[in-house]
Amino acid sequence: MAGKNIVLFGPPGAGKGTQAVKLKDLLSIPHVSTGDMFRYHIKNSTQLGLTAKEYSNKGQLVPDEVTIAMVKDRLSQPDMKNGFLLDGFPRSVPQAEALDKILTELNMKLDHVVNISVSDDQIRARLAKRASIEGRADDADPKVIQNRIDTYKSQSEPCLAYYRPKGIVHDIDGIGAIDEVFERISSLF
Ligand code: AMP
């Protein structure tokens, strides 16, 4: 399929990060994860990190003005020219609109939205497992997990309705072994 400007979409715990690493290797494109970018800033206690921590610790979205500026800066860099894999952005319709605007300004467009779907129960089970393996603060507390699921449903999921009429959404069943899910995703490209 032509074009490698890709958004990897799905609820927290869908396996986006794991699949992104495999897909960026297959397609030889940079992986841009807003969650990873925020975690880097939090770890290094930058000003941006201090802001991000306030929100991510509660399972809430970091404000758009911070997030969109960070993504714009990254997408403006020269290594994006042959494609990119966005993971964790957009997470709201205003962010999806902002992404279109950024890409238009850069003379680019979005080619694919790969939507990895998993059930709520599966999300909870996976986040609990990740908390014990990776020690991520935002995966450990059931209240924070529920907040992240609620935030996904109310703010992020509507992005799909934004993208569907454009004919660029590919729905992928996220249940199964990592390699099985990757097989489904890679067969798109
Ligand atoms: P993730 O690793 O993608 O689950 O992101 C971890 C946390 O970073 C999220 O719970 C949010 O607090 C924050 N975050 C990541 N991406 C975004 C985004 N696009 N908009 C706002 N906040 C974000």
Image: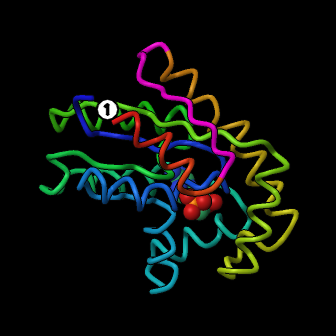
Q: Position of residue 3 (x, y in %)?
A: 23, 33
Colour scheme in the image?
Answer: rainbow
What residue lies at 26% left-to-right and 36% top-to-bottom? 103
Q: Please identify the residue farthest to the top as the structure is shown.
A: 165
Q: Which residues are magenta?
A: 165-176
| Quarter of the N terminus within the rendering | top left
Q: Is residue 51 magenta?
A: no
Percent of width and height locating residue 84? 28, 49
Q: Is residue 164 visible?
A: yes
Q: Residue, x 74% and y 64% (percent of image)?
A: 127
In the depicted view, which residue is nearer to us: 66 or 74?
74
Looking at the image, which residue is at 63% across and 44% down?
174
The yes-or-no answer for disc 1 within 8 Å of ligand 1 is: no
Q: In this picture, is 8 found above or below 101? A: below
Find residue 30 and report its image quarter.
bottom left
Q: Secondary structure at mark 1?
A: loop
Task: Looking at the picture, tell me which residue is in the foreground, 51 or 86.
Answer: 86
Q: Is 51 rendered above or below residue 159?
A: below
Task: Please name the amino acid that badge 1 sits on.
Answer: Leu
* 145 lies left or right of 88: right
Tell me residue 106's x, y (percent).
17, 38
Q: Which residue is mark 1?
A: 110
Residue 174: in magenta span:
yes
